[in-house]
Image: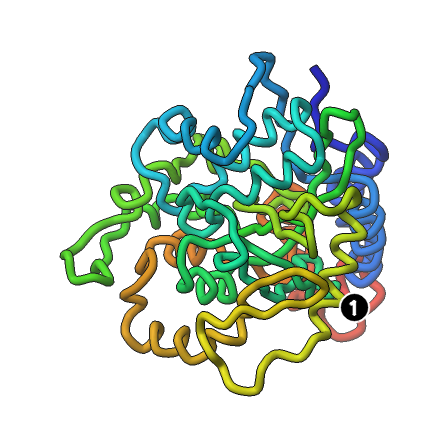
Amino acid sequence: MASYGCTCGGLLQPLYLILLLATSFLQPRSALANEIAQVSEQLALTVTQANEIAQVEEPWKGRVVNDLFAEYNNVFRHGNRNAASHKWVRFLLERSEQMTHEHLLYMFSGFCGVSGSPVRPSDYNRYRLRLDRVDGSGKVAGFFHYCCWPCVCDTQDFIRVDTRNVTAIDGITRTYNFAVIGNPCNNAQELQKPFKDAFGRGTSTLAHDAPEVRCGENGELLQAPMSDHGFVIIAMFFGAGDDNNNNDDNNNNNNDALALADSEPQKSPQPGRISEVGGVKFQDEFEFVQMCEDRKNNGYNSGMGEIFRKVAAISPIEIGVPPQGVFGSLASSRLAEGNASDEECSAGEEGKAGCR
């Protein structure tokens, strides 16, 4: 069966970058920094950090979101679904080539990306948000289906948008917008750190409250699909009409979502109010400004409490900054060495390798 998520073009470029870093002690720091930046830009165009996810061979007969809910115990084998929606994502991506584009979108509307709770999609639980793309190219407007309104606040604080290619039953590979967070396994010890429960139920840990957030020996979040820039995918970020099965092209839907972002929100927040633009009904994030502030002031004692927030805060996404990885680590290390060399240079040695 075919798989996706790995772009093989430009394999010589990563090798060149490694060679560049290995021999960079011969170059002045400024020249090294410029060359690394140029190669990094080229790599961004040809290499994805999305991990390969193989298709399962066993046919899946899921037709409605209730069929997805029925897989709960197969998806979550180590405990509850708290902050583990990446496992719903993986289940669907492993079966994407058994589904049409429209059916895949519909199935992705069947769970909350923040809590991991099963959700029956409706106009009332569709929320519009405007989130930053991880590459720093700006904000994009889109929709989530949530289990409850506090997920709006947690999304605003921690979730960003990235892309990944997915192939459907028609054999066409499309680029989708996904909601992403940083990899909590970059600092896995934080999962064992005690904290006070937001609802006054004593002290707990993420390892206890979010048992499906599990780390591998190489620092990977087990079973997590990764985005093109190497972040953890936890949900799809729908464009206008995506979750209504009204459109055939995801990129066009994203343009619709951007158009929706230009519509003015109401002047006074009114939680629960349904807005409608272009035939799409939703609750706008603007309606919850004061409620999110009140929730913050009360220690996040609603929704999931702090479980998702603490998972996402372990390795928060910095816009325009790549996640921890081999190329980023090597480049950062080499540039740090260049800075150290600068400090050792004495007057009159500006032309020496490693000096400015």
Number of numbered discs: 1
> Residue shown at 75%/63% (left/top)?
137
Is 322 positioned to the left or the right of 126 in the image?
right
In x, y percent, where is residue 182?
52, 51
Q: Place residue 176 in its image quadrant.
A: top right
Where is the C terminus found, in terms of image quarters? bottom right
Is 173 located above or below residue 283 in the figure? above
- The amino acid type, in three-letter code, at marker 1 is Arg
- Which residue position holds label 1? 356
Mark 1 residue element: loop
Q: Place residue 89 in its image quadrant.
A: top right
Is 76 positioned to the left or the right of 111 in the image?
left
Is 207 positioned to the left or the right of 184 in the image?
left
In x, y percent, where is residue 106?
60, 40
Within 10 angstroms of label 1, few (less than 14), some, or many (20 or more) residues? some
**Which residue is most to the front?**
279
Is 64 located above or below residue 154 in the figure? above
Q: Nearer the viewer, residue 321 or 165?
A: 165
> Residue shown at 58%/51% (left/top)?
179
Residue 23 in sight in this render: no
In x, y percent, where is residue 193?
27, 51
Q: Nearer the viewer, residue 75 or 157?
A: 75
Where is the N terminus found, in terms of image quarters? top right
> Residue shown at 39%/75% (left/top)?
291
In x, y percent, where is residue 293?
39, 78
